[in-house]
Image: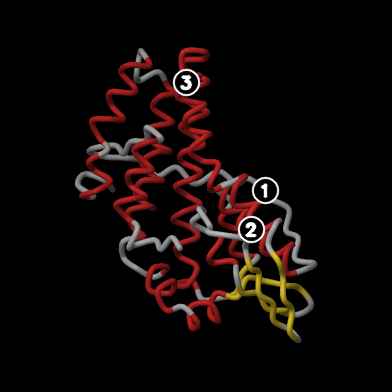
Amino acid sequence: MPLLPSSRPAFLTFIVSLATCVAVGGCAHDAPRRRSVPLNLSTPKDAALTFVRAIGQGDAATAKAASLGTDAQKHWIDAVAGLIDGLRRLDEALLGRFGQAAERMHINLNDSLRPLSEHAEAEIESATVKEVDQQASVIPLGRTVSIQVPYARRLRLDHGTWKVDLPTLYTEDPRLGIAAESPDIQIYERAGNALRGVARDIASGRYKTLAAARDAVNEQMGSVHSGIGVH
């Protein structure tokens, strides 16, 4: 089961495989783009699907609206969804600036994002649901490969709508609560902010060739590990 802080090296390797980067020196904080995922909380499975779909599309607002918990308990949603938003903006900027030359990077990026989008949704869609009074459990089939699916396993009926129940989940599995509130979450926030800045630079023509953009990505990935130079 993926845990955010304990899996940090693996997840940073995942980021590297997507050819992402962070800017060394100053970096403007572009706000995450709002990708409006429909808020469907009609059934436990609908709510769980809305939750994982919104995170996979970089829509933190909808994911938080589909869940219960404090701001601290939901902080990781902003961080992970913001990172995914940054990755998607990078992909759009590369295609927009370099066109067909960036097609291979586009394919690799989207293949790597699938565990957080299509695969995560498929895991929820194929899961079984057990309802007891005003609580429900979503039980995926087999081992999950998605970051957000383990956090969608408990739901509660709240004022007539179903929502992902983070407080109950963190009580049942304290590792998830510790992971969700870890200071290491800041790494994902910094990476997401930096990715949006890099995407903006690519779109503005700062990098004249795809090779230059790719070299900048590779050169600056170390900042994600250390946090040096990321603001």
Q: Is residue 118 left or right of residue 104?
A: right
Three-letter code, disc 2: Thr
Whether the residues at callouts 1 and 2 have beta carbons within 8 Å, the answer is yes
Three-letter code, disc 3: Arg
- Residue depicted at x 37% and y 50%: 11
Indicate whether 42 appears above or below 208: below
Q: Give residue 128's position: percent from left, percent from top.
A: 71, 66
Q: Give residue 54's position: percent from left, percent from top.
A: 62, 53
Crowding at mark 2 (Cα within 10 Å: few <14, some 14-19, many 20+): many
Indicate whether 100 appears above or below 8: above
Total marks in image = 3
Give the mark nearer the N terminus: 1 vs 2: 1
Whole-number angstrom distance, CA of label 2 to CA of label 3: 31 Å
Q: Give residue 12's position: percent from left, percent from top.
A: 33, 47
Indicate whether 169 appears above or below 32: below
Residue at label 2?
Answer: 62
- Residue depicted at x 78% and y 68%: 43
- Residue depicted at x 55% and y 74%: 166
- Residue depicted at x 75% and y 80%: 159
Q: Residue furthest front?
A: 142
SS at mark 2?
A: helix
Whole-number angstrom distance, CA of label 1 to CA of label 2: 7 Å
Instruction: Between label 1 and label 3, give the one nearer the viewer.
Output: 3
Residue at label 1?
Answer: 36
Three-letter code, disc 1: Ser
Front-lying residue, 133 or 1: 1
SS at mark 1?
A: loop
Whole-number angstrom distance, CA of label 1 to CA of label 3: 28 Å
Q: Residue furthest bottom?
A: 133
Residue at label 3?
Answer: 104
Q: Which mark is residue 79?
A: none
Q: Give residue 55's position: percent from left, percent from top.
A: 56, 53
